[in-house]
Image (spheres, grey):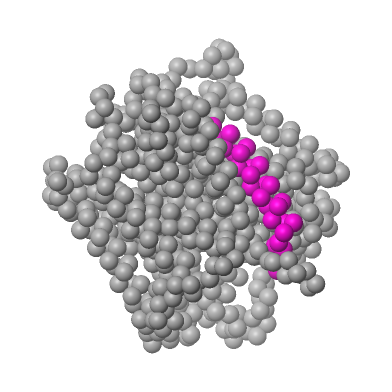
Amino acid sequence: MNEAEAKILPENAYQQLKPGESYSPIISAETQQPELTLRSIVWGVVFCVLFSVASAYSGLKVGQGMEAAIPISILAIGLARMFKRRSSLLENVIITGIGAASGSVVAGAIFTLPALYILHLDPHPVQTIFICLAGGCLGVLFLIPLRRYFVREMHGELPFPEATAITEVLVTGEKGGSQARLLIQATLIAAAYDFFTTTFQVWKEYLDFQFVPVMRTLADKGRMVFNFDAVSFILGLGYVMGLRSSLIFCAGGVLSNFVLVPLIWFIGSHIDIAVYPAAIPISKMTAVGIYSNYVRFIGVGAIATAGIVGVIKSLRVIAGSFGIALRVFRHGESPHTERTDRDLPILSILFGVVLGAIAVAIFFGRFQVSWTILLVGLVLTLVFSFFFTSVAANAIATTANNPASGMTMLTVIVSSVILFKFGLSGTTGMFFVMAIAGMVCTALCVSGQFITDLKAGYWLGSTPSAQEKIKFLGVITAAIAAGLTIILLAQTFQFGEAVPGNTRQVLAAPQASIMKALVVGFMSHQPIAYLLFGVGAMVTLVLEMLGKSSLVFALGMYLPLGLTSPVLAGGFLSHLVNKRSEKTGGERGKGIRERGVILASGLMAGGALGGVLGAALRLFPSYREDLIKTPFYSYDPISQTVSALLFVGLCLYVWLGSLKKED
């Protein structure tokens, strides 16, 4: 394969393979290229530490961490030109893989660990780091046997939006020329757009059109509220997902917001007493209140059931992995596989799981609980981590959204109920449950992000075993950096709400505050909304009976409508561009399709960069949203209309940019 060919993605990179057809990556299995080098490892660790610290602070302060993978891939491209020997494509994959562990480990940490400080349980620094480390390593170990299923066998069937963006960034950065310029142009436009939209008061980010009388009437009378998050990142995400997946994704949001919320309001609007799990009557709730107190639990039940269904579907792959393990045990050697399909030895994975289980058991033993409770806690940790690994991988591969909060809530609820039945309660029980939730949440966050790395590596020709080795390094680095950052912040700030008499500044830690409320409630033996979880489970079973993608739909039910609706806009735009590509045909038609993907990837990359910059700016004490404020910002009819027109302008930019003839 010559140099020119090595910089072009094959035509079937994003398409389902025909019978007998195989995919050949950019760097073939026979090609040897620098990959695991001192340069790639050192820079990956540096980026991992920097993004871990920044993301932990940002997530605790504003509830939004920093997306690491796409910005780091862009930094890796820029870094490659600084050396006499330009970094190889595979080295850049390694840098991105190590650095990207920061965002996933931090996400798992900030969802759970601050709750321990809010409860005044004050974990030891070693405990904080261990929870992050154990969960991250379990997520990597449990995902490796599923790599072939998600990455190879489902090739072309799962869109992998984030992996597509990373791959396009790395490939076009290698190629240069008009495609690289197009990617850079889209990235810069999206970065500026999302930075100003989400950081300052220039125009409204969220559109609800409540200034239109009919929309206001629907909201007041029927609790039917339309929301739209008008940012470039989500538009690019929907484009890469495609029309079919985005329709299913948005359909879940339609069911939640335009069927379930109005239905609950219709039934409960005349009831003046609170109906569990809510603390106030339905008659006094807004649409958001009904969604948060009732419908979201239905979404959690749907996601959990879809995850179980997904694991059942992948049992063949799991069984195949254990078959490989038996062959290795009997013959003493691994079956021959080519470089681009070579995982870590299955016996090493099994040994790692056993070692991890022993370490978790020792950790739980420090709580001085009975052997029964220790065993139950260990089983809950391993079972939830294993099952949710598949859920997270499938969710990220389809929608680039990890249902971490929903799965962690389910973990807290189930663990609290079961352990309470075995006699565990009080502060020890709360610490025990939050430790389980912290490990599980970190495991599913890491596994969801790791499948992105593996898919990008598959498209480019990386060695899976090399990616798997360095991911452990990334997890260790991120666990230490994130754990120490949380410990430091806990000494300086209050998490959650201000305590009377405490003058320290407050970091909201919104997700952890929710987990704290759950664990306190359930460890106090409050009733559980089993019916809501069961309704969600039934929705998933109905979809599976109809042969539809239940997890994508369930994610749409759980996530806010403001996120799913712009995804649909991107899906329709992708459909229109691809139709024009098919109609044009030939090299010209192929160019239209390629330019559309590059532009959408640029929107995702730029949107992520803009979000990172905005989140970083919020860390400064002098920051205020009104530092930049337009005269019309507070007047919704103008502000939301301007935002809608600019979003339409982004769509036209992608459309016209795709159709433009290359020089």
Q: Is residue 637 above or below residue 516?
A: below
Image quarter of the N terminus: top left
Image point 57% across, 12% down: which residue? 332
The kind of secondary structure the magenta stretch mainly shows is: helix
Highlighted range, magenta: 470-497
Pick whichever, 97 or 532, lies toward us. Answer: 97
Residue 535, image x, y percentages: 56, 63
State the image coordinates of residue 487 (x, y, percent, origin top left).
71, 51
Q: As drawn, is 608 to the left or to the right of 5?
A: right
Q: Is residue 507 above or below residue 579?
A: below
**Residue at 28 percent of width and 29 percent of height:** 6
Residue at image coords 25%, 37%: 11
Is 163 contained in the magenta span? no
Identify the residue at horizontal 70%, vertical 35% (top origin).
357
Residue 366, visible in the rendered structure: yes
On screen, residue 442 versus residue 355, left or right, reads: left
Q: Quadrant of residue 375?
A: top right
Closer to the camera in the image, 211 or 546:
211
Instruction: Examine the rendered structure and indicate whether residue 380 appears above or below residue 231.
Output: above
- Seen in the image, is 539 located left or right of residue 378? left
Q: Toward the viewer: 531 or 133?
A: 133
Q: Is residue 246 visible?
A: no
Measured as percent of width and height from the top left, residue 306 is found at 51, 51
As drawn, is 41 to the left or to the right of 458? right
